[in-house]
């Protein structure tokens, strides 16, 4: 039976088990001692949130294949005031590195009351901050940060909160996972993930 984990990646941790030579960033081995699992997708070291790890190469490929376009949800703390024009630009897609992003879901949200990051984010007293919820179906390099920068809302903090399996069930999320904590997927989650690898894409009959 394959092993699949959900991990709440803290700030300052790479999405790999070996540290980079000369880097101050930590690695997954500082938090996870399960052999043979690798991240399905990645989060930058300066981002936080949900990371799925598995020892099933087919599942890893399935979840990261852009053709399947799994929605990934992020909470984003930005510097500045969120306007409807900025939200509409994000929803339509913005130019990043000479290529337009796919349409996103974007809305302003109240402060979600997350635990303070370690280290804390920087604050400028004369510049307001606000929160966005953004959902993407693609994962280009530092995409969320580049998208918010394109609408004059620099990202201060980025937390991935959920991954939608696109099967009609609830997304996988961070429920019950404090930063630095992981758990194995539940039997139901395992069944749903396995269904992604079947030709029908549907769970097997009970």
Image (tube, rainbow, N blue to C red):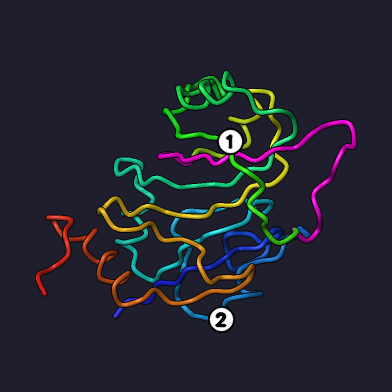
Q: What element carries label 2?
A: loop
Could you give the CA–CA distance between mark 1 and mark 2, rounded to whole angstroms? Answer: 38 Å
Who's the residue at 62% across and 31% down the image?
Answer: 148
> Image check: 82 left or right of 190?
right
Image position of 71 with respect to 205: above or below:
above
> Image check: 17 left or right of 192?
right
> Image check: 75 left or right of 111?
left
Residue 84's tag is none
Most prominent secondary structure in the magenta stretch?
Answer: loop
- Residue 130's image quarter? top right
Q: Tell me residue 44's x, y (percent).
A: 62, 50
Q: Residues within 10 Å of mark 1 (few under 14, many from 20)?
A: some
Q: Is residue 127 covered in magenta?
A: yes
Please name the residue that numbered disc 2 is placed on. 33
What is the tally of numbered marks visible in this picture? 2
Who's the residue at 60% across and 69% down the image?
Answer: 28
Q: What element carries label 1?
A: strand
The magenta segment is 117-139
Image position of 50 with respect to 85: above or below:
below
Please name the residue that numbered disc 1 is placed on. 108
- Which of the two discs, 1 and 2, sits closer to the camera? 1
Q: Residue reaching furthest front? A: 110
Q: Tell me residue 16's x, y (percent).
A: 57, 63
Q: Tell me residue 138's x, y (percent).
A: 43, 39
Q: How crowded is mark 2: few (under 14 residues within 10 Å), some or many (20 or more)?
A: few
Q: Tell me residue 53's x, y (percent).
A: 45, 66
């Amino acid at each position: 039976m394959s092993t699949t984990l959900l991990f709440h990646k803290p700030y300052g941790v790479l999405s790999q088990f070996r540290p980079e030579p000369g880097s101050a960033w930590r690695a997954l081995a500082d938090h996870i001692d399960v052999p043979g699992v690798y991240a399905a997708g990645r989060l930058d070291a300066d981002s936080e949130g949900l990371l799925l790890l598995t020892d099933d190469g087919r599942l890893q490929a399935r979840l990261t294949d852009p053709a399947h376009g799994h929605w990934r949800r992020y909470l984003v703390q930005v510097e500045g005031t969120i306007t409807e024009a900025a939200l509409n630009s994000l929803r339509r897609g913005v130019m990043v590195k000479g290529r337009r992003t796919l349409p996103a879901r974007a809305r302003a949200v109240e402060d979600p009351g997350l635990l303070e990051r370690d280290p804390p984010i920087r604050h400028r007293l004369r510049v307001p901050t606000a929160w966005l919820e953004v959902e993407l179906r693609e994962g280009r390099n530092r995409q969320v940060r580049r998208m918010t920068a394109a609408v004059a809302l620099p990202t201060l903090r980025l937390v991935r909160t959920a991954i939608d399996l696109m099967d009609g069930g609830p997304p996988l999320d961070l429920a019950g996972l404090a930063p630095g904590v992981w758990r194995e997927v539940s039997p139901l989650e395992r069944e749903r993930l396995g269904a992604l690898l079947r030709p029908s894409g549907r769970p097997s009959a009970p």
